[in-house]
Image (spheres, helix red, strand yellow):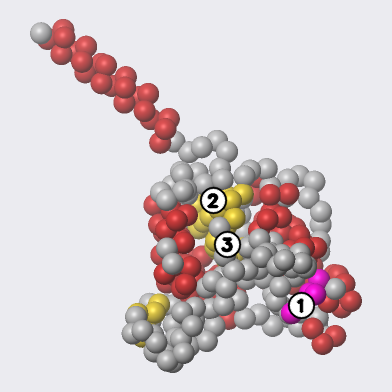
């Protein structure tokens, strides 16, 4: 009986050992994108505008899954369960890029609360929606909560600042950044281990400065926020270059940036 017991223990150990690789990081990660219309594949019927997310796969060596949805903020993306949807997909070793800001402004306190405005502040402040009485958190709260969920599953997170609006609008160059650029940087820092920050705003700003007035204005066929496909491609190139040059330090995407990517600033 002792011999049989020892065999059972050995067999149990062997089965456990065989199961271990399933829990290890995948050799090739998947990059998931969470964002708004400036990242999402455009729904414009005429093809005049597009988000930068669909173009990122040209500049990295790993698969990219774009979960960005137009019109979303960190708050609405969270409340709609879209961060959770990504959490249910990620595996250990995957990378999630979180980029919001364009739809996060305003105040949730009014009766006309649009369901997108975050509570003002950079910490754990809360507001009450003037429309439905629900609790509204800050931009940083939503981003950090999502990031920590992914990190707990073994993924890593890149918090990315929003792309700029047309910085040459009106013919003069502007370097003014919305407050959510700083909020994104702070959120990435406060998440701690497993998270990093990429200043996508600054990267695209650098590209627009180099491109100049006429070239930049040509990338905005409809408004000052949504770019043409060429502009979306430029934003993806700027993002990849920021990672390659370690604009804000090393990110987990760095090993997977294509060697021959164009230089846009």
The quadrant holding residue 42 is: bottom right
Per the model, the C-alpha gap separating discs 3 and 1 is 20 Å
Query: How far from the left and from the top, in percent, is residue 135?
Result: 35, 80
Left or right: residue 251 compared with residue 54: left
Label ID, residue 61: none
Counting other residues with Cα less than 10 Å from the Cα at mark 3, is it few (<14), some (14-19), or many (20 or more)?
Answer: many
Residue at the spot of label 3: 68
- Determine if the magenta segment contains residue 222: yes
Give the spatial CA distance, label 2 vs label 1.
32 Å
Which callout, 3 or 1, points at the residue further toward the start of the chain? 3
Dot placed on the residue nearer the N-terminal end, 2 or 1: 2
- x and y, in percent, of residue 83 in the image: 46, 61
Image quadrant where one finds the C terminus: bottom right
SS label for mark 1:
loop
The region drawn magenta spans 219-223
Main secondary-structure element of the magenta-colored stretch: loop
Measured along the vertical axis of the image, is residue 84 above or below residue 223? above
Q: Which mark is residue 222?
A: 1
The location of residue 188, given as percent across then percent down, is: 51, 65
Position of residue 240 measured from the top left corner of the image (x, y, whole percent): 70, 55
Q: Secondary structure at mark 3?
A: loop
Q: Secondary structure at mark 2?
A: strand
Q: Give residue 95's mark.
A: 2
- The image quadrant that residue 15 belongs to is top left
State the residue at coordinates (46%, 43%). Answer: 92
Please state, as top left, top right, bottom left or bottom right, where the N terminus lies in the image: top left
Mark found first going from the N terminus, 2 or 3: 3
Task: Answer above or below: position of 141 versus 55.
Answer: below
Q: Nearer the viewer, mark 3 or mark 1?
A: 1
**Residues tagged 2 and 3 counted as in contact (Cβ below 8 A):** no
């Amino acid at each position: 009986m002792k011999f049989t017991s020892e065999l059972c223990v050995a067999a149990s150990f062997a089965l456990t050992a065989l199961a271990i690789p399933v829990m290890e990081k995948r050799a090739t990660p998947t990059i998931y994108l969470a964002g708004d219309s400036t990242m999402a594949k455009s729904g414009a019927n005429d093809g005049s505008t597009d988000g930068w997310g669909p173009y990122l796969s040209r500049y990295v060596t790993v698969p990219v899954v774009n979960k960005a949805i137009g019109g979303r903020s960190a708050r609405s993306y969270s409340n709609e369960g879209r961060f959770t949807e990504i959490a249910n997909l990620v595996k250990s070793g995957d990378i999630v890029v979180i980029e919001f800001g364009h739809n996060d402004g305003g105040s949730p306190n009014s009766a006309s609360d649009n369901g997108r405005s975050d509570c003002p502040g950079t910490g754990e402040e809360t507001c009450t929606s003037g429309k439905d009485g629900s609790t509204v958190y800050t931009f940083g709260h939503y981003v950090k909560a999502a990031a920590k969920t992914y990190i707990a599953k073994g993924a890593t997170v890149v918090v990315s600042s929003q792309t700029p609006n047309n910085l040459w609008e009106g013919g003069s160059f502007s370097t003014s950044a919305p407050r959510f650029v700083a909020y994104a940087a702070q959120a990435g820092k406060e998440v701690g281990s497993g998270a990093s920050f990429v200043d996508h705003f600054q990267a695209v700003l650098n590209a627009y400065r180099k491109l100049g007035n006429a070239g930049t204005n040509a990338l905005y066929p409809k408004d000052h926020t949504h770019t043409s496909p060429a502009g979306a491609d430029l934003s993806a190139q700027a993002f990849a270059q920021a990672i390659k040059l370690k604009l804000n330090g090393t990110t987990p995407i760095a090993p997977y940036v294509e060697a021959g990517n164009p230089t846009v600033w």
